[in-house]
Image: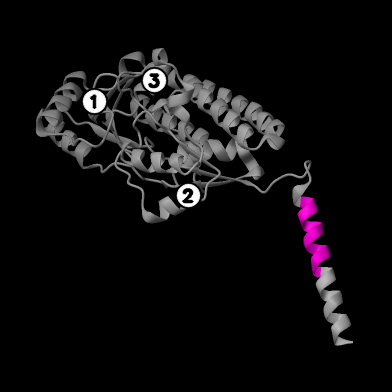
Amino acid sequence: MRSYAFLLAVLLSAGMVTSCGQTRGNDTALPDRLSVVATTSMIADLATQIGGEHVSVTGLMGPGVDPHLYKASAGDVTRLSGADVILYNGLHLEGKMADVFERMRQRGIPVFAVAEESVTGEDLIDSDLFQGNYDPHIWFDVPLWQGAARRVQEILAEADPLRAAAYRERLASYLAEMDRTHAYVRERTAAVPADRRVIVTSHDAFGYFGRAYGFEVHGLQGISTAAEAGTADVQQLADLVAARRIPAMFVESSISPRGIEAVQEAVRARGFEVGIGGTLYGDALGDPDSQAGTYLGMMRQNIDTIVAALAGDPV
């Protein structure tokens, strides 16, 4: 009796395994969710918006993290090693992670520089670092970032072709939302008098924003935060702010406010009082449960902060 029960259990187990195997082996069966690891919160948000329930997205850099200085931890390497797809910005934004990306490629993991692959040289702003280098902050121009969204959809569809139609559908919906946000930023910009459309920030991250929406942009530090600003940089920016009587400067969520505060003191010494207009989200999104926790919300919050400070317009 025990032998019969044991044999029955073995047969049932074998049947269950065979049944599961047939389900997984069926050409029409959908695979498990695609595992996507993204570096910045902007790219993680793109993957989430376009992939939806079909992807599992892990972002390496959370709110307030500076990608220019970020180094991969042992835990990051483990997460990257387990990914189906790795997405990063490129254009030297994650400059200290280049070796890690190359190691992942050597292991056969698909690695994509989303921003770098989605724009052409004529759309890029030259960097102040060295010849042939470009400003990596393309997400501040919504139409340019739509190109990055299209590239993410292509990558997901290639990695998971059975859900390609779903990714295309989600992309179309998201592009429409991006169009509305682009229109909102342009509409809000109109509230700022032309002679006051000057954005002064901790580092030069808003060049694409300025070009797209008609603002003059000045940063205490250059395009990368890897090089610290010196006394001469502080004094030069203070001269500009005082001479132009710019009403407000902005700190950034991922950079210490000390540099901008030093400029504020230097401007005060020149007999002009400049305010701190608030915090802008530059190299990272905000907390996940805040408005700035998504790319579109971040763009709206940034322009609202800018308008309130430069035009005196309440949000």
Rendered residue at 36%/53% (across/down): 73
Q: Amino acid at mark 2?
A: Ser
Task: From the image, tell me which residue sits under label 3.
Answer: 192
Task: From the image, tell me which residue sits under label 1.
Answer: 129
The magenta stretch spans which residues? 13-23
Q: Residues under labels 2 and 1: Cα distance?
A: 31 Å
Q: How many residues crowd around disc 2 within 10 Å: few (fewer than 14), some, or many (20 or more)?
A: some
Mark 1 secondary-structure assignment:
loop
Task: From the image, tell me which residue sits under label 2.
Answer: 81
Q: Residues under labels 2 and 3: Cα distance?
A: 48 Å
Rendered residue at 37%/24% (across/down): 311
Rendered residue at 81%/73% (across/down): 10
Q: How many residues crowd around disc 1 within 10 Å: few (fewer than 14), some, or many (20 or more)?
A: few
Q: Is residue 299 left or right of residue 234?
A: right
* Magenta highlight: main SS: helix
Residue 296 in view here: yes
* Sequence order check, earlier mark of 2 and 1: 2
Residue 264 drawn at (x, y percent): 18, 35
